[in-house]
Amino acid sequence: MLHIVVCIKQVPDSREIRIDPNNNTLIRQGVPSIVNVYDLHGLAAALRIKKEYGARVTVITMGPPPAVKSLKECISLGADEAILVSDRKFAGADTLATSYVLTKAIQKAAEEWGPVDMVFCGKQTLDGDTGQVGPGIACRLHLEQLTYVGKIIQIDLKKRRVRVLRYLEDGIEAVETNLPVLITALKEISPVHRASLSGMIRAARYKPPVWTTASFSHVDYNQIGLKGSPTIVGKTWVPKVRKVEGEEIKGETPEEIAIQLFNKRNVQEQLGWL
Amino acid sequence: MPAKKGTKEQMPDWSQYRGILVFVEQRNRVPKSVSWQLLGIGKKMATKLKAPLIALVIGDQVGEIAQEAIYYGADRVYLCEGPELKDYRTYPYSRITLNLIRECKPEICLFGATATGRDLAGAIATHLPTGLTADTTQLDVEPPPSRLLLASRPAFSEKMMATILCKKYRPQMATARAGVFEALPRDPSRTGEIIRIKNEIRESEIATKIIEFIEEKGKVHLEEADVIVAGGRGLGGPEGFKLLKELAQELGGEIGATRPCVDVGWISHDYQIGQTGATVRPKLFIAAGISGAVQHTVGMQNSEVIVAINKDPDAPIFQIAHYGIVGDLFQIIPALIREAKKRKAAKQHGASLFRS
Ligand SMILES: Cc1cc2nc3c(=O)[nH]c(=O)nc-3n(C[C@H](O)[C@H](O)[C@H](O)COP(=O)(O)OP(=O)(O)OC[C@H]3O[C@@H](n4cnc5c(N)ncnc54)[C@H](O)[C@@H]3O)c2cc1C
Ligand SMILES: Nc1ncnc2c1ncn2[C@@H]1O[C@H](COP(=O)(O)O)[C@@H](O)[C@H]1O
């Protein structure tokens, strides 16, 4: 049976975040937390594989204790196990440190429930918005890496090959590779279904295992949390709208306006009319 | 001497790390314009640092692209060719890039924030390891001695900007959005050095196989358009875009749209400009029936000349427009089409006459 790990992150719904115009700070109050949308689609893809080929689906998140809410949501949708990786020492991690800890957790999941054949990540998070954690994990675990996957075409369990479509800016790439593989999911990879009643009941009772630094046989403290994060946030600011000294084009008739506009030297220049 | 408390943190010696490396992306031997944009901003920073601008070109028979990279500003180009490198694949491309970075030790590495650039940069940053800032829209460097890359990017749905620093690792890496930075004019008189590097990876060692690539032909590339006539909710329906298309064709450009038009299905997402669409910087941008929300303007505010047509004189779009026309777009746009046609006809006629 396949063992699939899905990495999910609980994020503030950034669409709901507003800026306080008085002091240019973020208003986070009352902003709901959600499972990062792409991660939910990744989970849905994993659950589809479970249905079709048979698989064990383990969900992992690194985050503070309130992330339990998101893990329960994943259980209600059909995940077999959902792990909270949580420790003060993990706090302040950038993508490099995050991928280190998630790698540790995936390795531990493999020890507990068997070798991992597939790892799903989202294309990117709504808050971090980098799309770097997936490739980071693939690199650390020496997995083949397929990013921006919009469709899983087939899995050949005998040959241990997987064929997918990657949706890129300039077209669609059909590509095949070996298991174990890390896939980063687009929304198109699978629709997210609603939780079943039995799923909801299971989720209500479910207590996610919590893994801390002490749960791992070896942790390099230089690679986790703030210390393991090469990037730091310098300054932040609210972008000002670039105001230009605009000129109003007026005229008695639309024709007059059109003539005036096309008489402007820089307009003619940009149009290549000169 | 031991560093005293309160004195500046001791920085490692990075003096071996010099220069800015730009990964040049291509598909089927056609370079992506974001690569030239990266060379453009890379040149500015390299000049400040008095350091070389280096390009890396990987592919099958892509020598011409290496030459082009010089025309677009590179001082030195590393070129790695082979049939197994025709299409981008993470394993061979990341190995080649890693080896080069380890050998030539650039202080900054830039990639397009494209699927390929993000895939590659993510793998490399973890291998090295070093810090990587995603999706930057502003890039600058502190002058020597710090030589720090100031990589700025939008955060929280573009509501904020943040500058990300990588102080303790080299190289400093970033991916940068397409369409944001300006390429240098192509200059075929520019000279530089092309250095071939060998690909050590055989096809048999690469697990990933590309079965096929289906290019989306009809796909618009707004990033490349010189003129964009964009419409918003003020168009009132899909027919409005036909009108814009007519003007765009007269002016030799493309059409664009705001998100609400895409959401209700007046036009496909390929045409969306803004935070969740394309970032464009055409020479001329005409905004018709667009209010000017920040999520839209982040994607077009760097256009050379912006013309706004809106019937509401208080519409925020006028704040960023070089020319504002307060009026009904259904009157103004047809007048612009007629006038453009007239001038084109006059020009053709004029060309056949002697001019004094
Ligand atoms: C997370 C997030 C991401 C987003 N991403 C994007 C994005 O990528 N791109 C984007 O565009 N938006 C985006 N938006 C939406 C954005 O906030 C605005 O809602 C949107 O840009 C407004 O579009 P509009 O100007 O077409 O519509 P409106 O704001 O409704 O403006 C229509 C304008 O047309 C004018 N008008 C009406 N009739 C006429 C007429 N006959 N002649 C002349 N003028 C007329 C009106 O005066 C008005 O100013 C995003 C929003 C969120 C929350
Ligand atoms: N703290 C985290 N815990 C679990 N998965 C994560 C975490 N951060 C990122 N990921 C995964 O990595 C993907 C890309 O994240 P990012 O690089 O932050 O954009 C997400 O969609 C998740 O699948």
Image: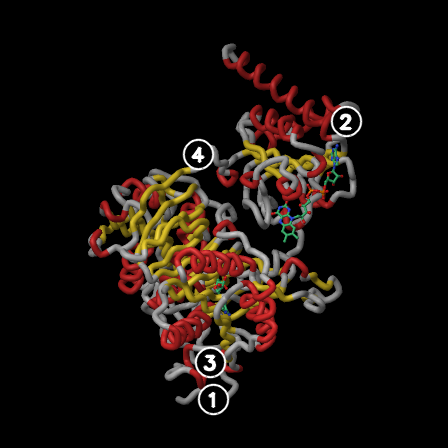
> Which amino acid lies under the numbered mark 3 shown in the image of this protein?
Glu
The verdict on a common chain for dots 1 and 3 is yes
Residue A117 seen from this side = yes
Mark 2, residue position: A251
Label total for image: 4
Mark 1, residue position: B4
Above or below, A241 relative to B335: below
Q: Secondary structure at mark 2?
A: loop
Discs 3, 4 touching: Cβ within 8 Å: no
Q: Secondary structure at mark 1?
A: loop
Above or below, B291 relative to A229: above
Gap in Å between the C-alphas at discs 3 and 4?
A: 54 Å
Sooner in the amino-acid sequence: mark 3 or mark 4: 3
Q: Counting other residues with Cα less than 10 Å from the Cα at mark 4, is it few (<14), some (14-19), or many (20 or more)?
A: few
Q: Nearer the viewer, mark 3 or mark 4?
A: 4
Residue B141 seen from this side = no
User: Residue B9's mark?
Assistant: 3
Task: Give A138 or A162, whichever is nearer the viewer.
Answer: A162
Task: Give B201 or A192, whichever is nearer the viewer.
Answer: A192
Mark 4, residue position: B217
Q: Chain of mark 1?
A: B
Write down the quadrant of residue B254 in the picture: top right
Task: Give B27 or A113, whichever is nearer the viewer.
Answer: A113
**Residue that protrudes farthest toward the top in the picture:** B353
Gap in Å between the C-alphas at discs 3 and 2?
A: 64 Å
Q: State the image coordinates of residue A42 (x, y, percent, origin top left).
A: 48, 58
> Which amino acid lies under the numbered mark 4 shown in the image of this protein?
Lys
> Which amino acid lies under the numbered mark 2 shown in the image of this protein?
Gly
Q: State the image coordinates of residue A230 (x, y, percent, origin top left).
A: 45, 71
Write down the quadrant of residue B266 in the picture: top right
The verdict on a common chain for dots 3 and 2 is no
